[in-house]
Amino acid sequence: AKAAVVVPYHELRLVKEELREFDEQTQLDVREFRHRIAEAERELSGLLRSTAEFRKEVDDAEAKWHKHQDYKKVLMDAVQAALDSTKSSEPMEHAPHELLTDCFEKLHRLQNDMLEEDRKRKALLKESNALAEDISELKEVKARSMTQLQSFLELRAQQ
């Protein structure tokens, strides 16, 4: 059988006080971590909410740009097909003139539209990239705070 350990009452009170202070400090630190996490989440949610329409506009501009690129390729393929359909021995004026004229007009209008749209799209993308950096930074702050809280709690549990 083990012998009983006698600990004076005043020493127990000191240990109890140290544990209470340790616990209070832990709770204070945990509240601070949770506050940082909640603040990052609030900022992130607000930013995502306030920029949803803008981000959709950027997505729409990208989709429109890709659609224009596809249409341009179709028009260029149509021009090439019209040119290929003429016999090499025939002069160029025998090519399907109306089809070529129509394709060239559409291609010209499309290219004019694409220039204007591309300028707008690039401006949107520039602003969108800055916004994406802000969103990424807030996600990083939140994740880092959550990791720090977890590490802190694990460390405190060992003490």
Image (tube, rainbow, N blue to C red):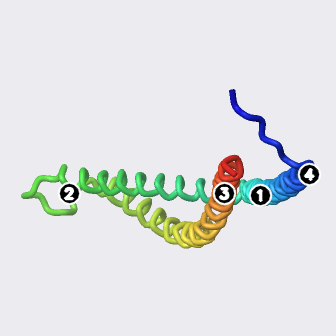
Q: Residue furthest left?
A: 89
- Work out whether mark 4 precedes mark 2 in sequence or the reverse, and give the earlier one: 4
Residue at the (49%, 66%) spot, across then down: 114
Q: Tell me if 13 is positioned left or right of 77 in this view.
A: right
- In percent of width and height, residue 2 lies at 70, 31
Number of the front mark, 1 or 4: 4
Amino acid type assigned to the residue bearing label 1 in the image: Phe
Q: Which residue is tagged 4? A: 13
Q: Disc 3 designates what residue?
A: 148
Question: Of marks 3 and 2, which one's residue comes earlier in the chain?
Answer: 2
Q: Residue at x 66, y 57 (%)?
A: 148
Name the side, left or right, on which 119 lies relative to 6: left
Side of 93 relative to 57 (left or right): left
Q: Residues within 10 Å of mark 1 (few under 14, many from 20)?
A: many
Sequence order check: which comes first, mark 2 or mark 1?
A: 1
Asked whether the viewer can see residue 55, the reply is no
Query: Which one is in front, 45 or 97?
Result: 45
Label annotation for residue 33: 1
Q: CA distance from mark 2 to mark 1?
A: 78 Å
Q: Nearer the viewer, residue 93 or 15?
A: 15
Which residue corresponds to mark 2? 94
